[in-house]
Image (spheres, rainbow, N blue to C red):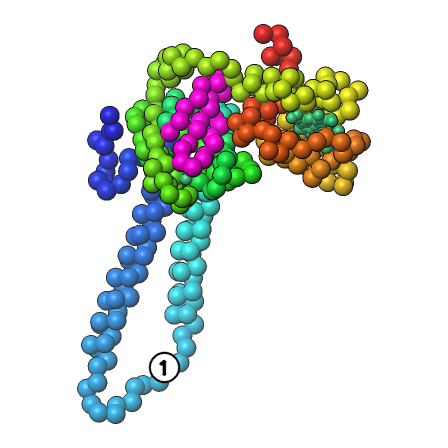
Amino acid sequence: MIQQSNNWVPLFPEKASSFAWQVDALYFYLIAISAFFTVIVVAAIFYFAIKYREKEKFQNGAEIHGSLLLETTWTAIPFLLSMTIFLGGAIVYYNQYRPPKDAMEIYVVGKQWMWKFQHPTGQREINELHVPVNRRIKLIMTSEDVIHDLYVPAFRTKADAVPGRYTTLWFEATKPGKYHLYCAEYCGLNHSGMIGWVYVMEQKDYENWLAGNVSSQTPAQAGRELFEAKLGCASCHQQTDQGRGPKLAGLFGKQVKLTNGQTVVADEEYIRNSILNPQGQIVEGYQPIMPTFKGQVTEEQLVALVEYIKSLGNETASMSK
Ligand code: HEC
Ligand SMILES: [Cu+2]
């Protein structure tokens, strides 16, 4: 199943994402520059060692004074070269660390010693991730215990999954196939077993796969249940502004004014913190009465709550279904 065919350097993992070639190009550019200067320097060492060897005892060399041309050249060339390295690196970095807005979002929870994935349609998988080809995928990751790091060599990308916060990683797979997935941060005894596969499928196959893995609930539906029934958030957060807590519809992505004068953007991290540490950021005009839910909700339930609150943004659309 693993396609190794059109792999132009046999030692390298396959290139299967939209930015894999950029990472490789940068890598080979750095290798080429290093090799070039290594050869020049080593050659010069030998050349001068022989040319200026001692031909006569206690010989004095001719004095050399500065040369502006020479000094300008050996300053300008390394400067320009290092700027190309910087620019190349910056471009690759920006591409990788700014997930596109239209990406499909999949939640990832790392724990000793497995990767848990949940699709927007609710399907869950462990140590396996099925994704459609040619589609931008954004992973929203966290960890239940220690720091892990999700790494897919064929996509040339990786990112830490950190307890207590959300990190993201995005990619667009360009070739159907089966690719290795690793934990790339030493995380304890069975770290080496924290591995799995990414299955990149044609859109049609992906839909079949989704259909064959019926899930009882989407994260947003599970979140709604928690919100309205199990955790009782709805007793304070109602559909109107009359409740004891602010109404949450349309909150996601908006600017929120806090009592300390700060303004923050309500992203996944903000919602997560609002649930676990409500006293940390108090919304302007409200009393600090929200209890903490730390220890009462699992990472997966948190994800569900975040997804539910996100889904309230387009409430009218989802209500009419
Ligand atoms: C006892 C009432 C109460 C309960 C129960 C409650 N909240 Fe709150 N919540 C508040 C109040 C009051 C605020 C505004 C003050 C603050 O930021 O702490 C708030 C703020 C928030 C915010 C930030 C809102 C914004 O406009 O920025 C979120 C998100 C939130 N709550 C989610 C939840 C969730 C999810 C639950 C259930 C797990 C929950 N709340 C349970 C009272 C409550
Ligand atoms: Cu790990």
Along the viewing direction, whichever of 129 and 22 lies nearer the viewer: 129
For residue 75, which quarter of the picture?
A: bottom left
Decide if residue 258 is on the left or right side of residue 217: right
Say whether residue 103 is visible.
Answer: no
Mark 1 surroundings within 10 Å by alpha-carbon count, few (fewer than 14), some (14 through 19), many (20 or more):
few
At x 34%, y 21%, the residue is 201
Magenta residue check for 116 = yes
Image: 147 above or below 115: below
For residue 8, which quarter of the picture?
A: top left
Decide if residue 59 is on the left or right side of residue 172: left
Say whether residue 277 is visible.
Answer: yes
- Pick out the residue farthest to the top: 321
Along the viewing direction, whichever of 211 and 169 lies nearer the viewer: 211
- Pick out the residue farthest to the bottom: 58
* Callout count: 1
Residue under pointer 1 = 64
Query: Ligand 1 shows up in which quadrant of the image?
Result: top right
Give the percent coordinates (x, y) of residue 247. 72, 22
Q: From the image, which quarter does the C terminus lie in?
A: top right
Give the percent coordinates (x, y) of residue 46. 22, 71
Dominant secondary-structure state across the stretch colored magenta = strand
Give the percent coordinates (x, y) of residue 29. 33, 49
Specify start and end residues of the magenta stretch as a single range.
106-127
At x 72%, y 17%, the residue is 239
For residue 267, which quarter of the picture?
A: top right
Give the percent coordinates (x, y) of residue 95. 46, 38
At x 43%, y 47%, the residue is 89
Image: 166 above or below 211: below
Mark 1: which secondary structure?
loop
At x 28%, y 58%, the residue is 36
Q: From the image, which quarter does the N terminus lie in?
A: top left
